[in-house]
Image: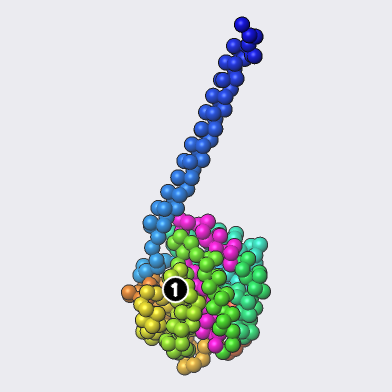
Amino acid sequence: MGTPTSRPTTRRRTKKTLLIAAAALLAIGLVAVIAFVGINAQTFFHALGARPPAVGTTIVAPSESKAARSAASPTGLSDDETAAATYLAAQPTAYWLTPELDPIDEVWDRIAHLADEARDQDAALAVVVYGLPGRDCGNHSAGGLDPEAYVEWTDLIGQALRNAQDVQKIVILEPDSLALAPDCGNVDERVVQLSGAADRLAGIDTWIYLDGGHSDWLSAQQMADLIRQVGVADRVRGFATNVSNYQSTSAEFDYAHEVAALLGGNVHAIVDTSRNGAGPAGSEWCNPGGRLVGDPGGTYGDDVVDTNLWIKPPGESDGTCNGGPDAGVWWPEGSAELTRDVR
């Protein structure tokens, strides 16, 4: 009889070791499968529960808004200006993401904080992405990133938004970018930039609205043609009108219906009512006097217009015109005038 190659005890130990290793691998595999199924089930249920903005939608009143900062440090403000800042700080208003205030290395944290506020307030997160190369064609809000940095910045924003799957997210993508493009002579460049940004920002329960100008700017036909050229109608919710302007709500609803019909009726709109309480001041758009805040967000909507929102923060200047400071800078005097009938 031949000599055994190993002792029986050694063989039993080896077999036991192999069984333990197999069991451990099986357990690890099961944990991985459960985690995978859990993550995908969570994603599935978030997708199933996703709903676009509508009448009754409330967005975050950000603690980092310029109104909130002014209200927290009212030194040098009159009583009216302090009251205006306090009132506006409490109003649900979109937060403007700009590379100047929220650069590449900080924008993720900003969105994470806004998402936490949305959860605390049981509200939607609403942001305006405003950092396009050649922004505002060198006008009052000139600035933005170079093309490569813009891709990186918007990619990070998209990742941060997707990280907040449980929060409804509304994105107003680059106000004025399309409506200004014909005058700036960069339509081809703009449509490529916006198409790419829309792709990078897209995600579950993220509702993206392109620039839709307003009713007293480009014709509905011109605006629809520009939106069509971006080529993302199947990937975005629609377009936003009246951002940072003063046109009446009824005029904007009519305009939105015209534009949507020209696009085949499969797109929707958001209307900015933050500063249209007194209607327009003729053709003046830069800090016109005598204006008022408009109806609160979530007040109106129909089969085309999802709802109205406060997109441009009242109290922030349009630019160095009619007594205002630089574009986007908090203007105490202007905030007091806009809120004179509501505080």
Relative to residue 320, is residue 27 depicted above or below?
Answer: above
Residue closer to the observer: 198 or 301: 198
| Residue 165 percent coordinates (x, y) | 47, 56
| Residue 158 percent coordinates (x, y) | 55, 63
Does residue 152 show up?
A: yes
> Which residue matches tag 1?
233
| Residue 312 percent coordinates (x, y) | 51, 76
Residue closer to the observer: 230 or 3: 3
**Which image quarter is the N terminus in?**
top right
**Rendered residue at 32%/74% (across/down):** 303
**Rendered residue at 55%/70% (across/down):** 197
**Which image quarter is the C terminus in?**
bottom left
**Structural crowding at the residue carrying mark 1, measured as other residues with C-alpha within 10 Å and reported as few (<14), some (14–19) or many (≥20):** some
Type of amino acid under label 1: Ala
**Rendered residue at 46%/87% (across/down):** 222
Q: Quadrant of residue 56?
A: bottom left
